[in-house]
Image (tube, rainbow, N blue to C red):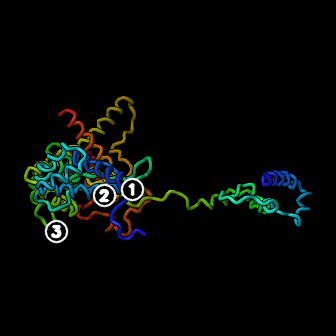
Amino acid sequence: MKHGVAFRKFSRTSSHRMLMLRNLVTSLLQHEQIKTTLPKAKDTARLAEKIITLGKKGDLTAFRRATGFLLDQSLVPKLFSELAQRYAERPGGYTRIHKFGNRPGDNAPHAILELVDNPRDLRFQMTARAVGWELLGKKVGQESLQSLTANGISDIEGIIEKEKIVPPEARGELRSVTRRNLQKVLRYQGSDAVEKMSRIAEDHVDTLLAQPLALKEIAAAKQEKKNKAAAFAGIRLKAGQTLPGGVRSTLHLAQGALGKENPGRWQWFTRRKLGVDKTSVWNQL
Amino acid sequence: MAAALALHQSRSWLSAITTPLARMSLAAAFVPAFLTAPKPFSWAIPSLPSLLELFPPWLLAVPKKKTSHSRKAMRSANKGLKDKQNLVHCESCGSPKLAHNLCPKCYRELNIAWKAKNRTA
């Protein structure tokens, strides 16, 4: 039985274990995003947050304790100035763990451990891209793809500013999950974060619009060379892949031709807030 | 010395009783070798030849017939790979991914972009 035991042993002696965790925390404070196994990430996160609390305290005792713990003395100034300022308002929770599948060699569950609000914050990037995807999905049915490619989506920054205030469960431009992530990610950041997010979203919208065009050009070039009659008109999707405005779930797509046209429990498979499935619109480029 | 001799005797005795005629005559007169000659006590696990002496050859378990193709196939019916149900769309690229995990495609793009930016800077 292991009821209520707080710490993991990692099949190492106590000195080895402590040194390994100190190494991981030092690497995390140096690179701000590391990849390791999930249990190691969970224990490292716990220790790293305590070290950042020492940085926030800022007095001599804290300085001595942090210097004794970290294995790279050049990180101590960073801890007491940059990281302390970054997390001045935030009450705890300075790290984030993203699960990342299993390692090929030994099938160990992997995770990405990162400091929140770091320059390459993964959640920030993914939320910004999700905003771009959803807004594009909404516009795809309303405007033609040519006009969208020419003009893009206007005033993403304004939409983000509005969505910051809307309560999570209410109706808005975005899905409630995306809105919740957006609010969490922008909570302790300034106005330049909104601008950064809108830039990432716009770039992502451009990428999404450019892909089918590029594929079509490649297909057309191949056609000219081979002089064959029937060309594949639409976009060739990978297995399980969907397009902005798509509504079928991954599992429903995986069934393919064997799946039902309208599955019995329709409301659990479709995202009705986004409306009708618009995958066919993308074939009309 | 006596133990070694007893072991040698048992080995030659064992090879003798493998002949079919000898097996018949053995039913009543079977005595394991380690009971005839007393051995000094040791913590070592008795070696395989001495353990096998407890079970004469006709008492060891053995398959009666070759397992048929159909029976073998039935036994491995539920050993196949199980389908994964926890698949969802990535919210940024639309490709399938494991639920509650990062999208590997998106992470790779972001990683490459970051490293390229840092290399030029």
Q: Are marks 3 and 1 in contact (CB under 8 Å)?
A: no
Q: Which mark is residue A170?
A: 3
Going 68% across and 56% down the picture, which residue do you hit?
B69
Residue B71 at x, y percent in the picture: 67, 60
**Residue that carries the numbered disc 2 in the rendered image:** A43
Residue B15 relative to residue B107: left or right: right
Which mark lies nearer to you, 3 or 2? 2
Q: Is residue B15 visible?
A: yes
Choose the circle earlier in sequence order: 1 or 2: 1
| Mark 1 vs mark 2, CA separation in Å | 10 Å
Choose the circle earlier in sequence order: 3 or 1: 1
| Mark 3 vs mark 2, CA separation in Å | 37 Å
Q: Nearer the viewer, residue A55 or A167?
A: A55
Residue A221 at x, y percent in the picture: 32, 32
**Residue that carries the numbered disc 1 in the rendered image:** A10
Amino acid bearing label 3: Ala
Q: Chain of mark 1?
A: A
Q: Which mark is residue A192?
A: none
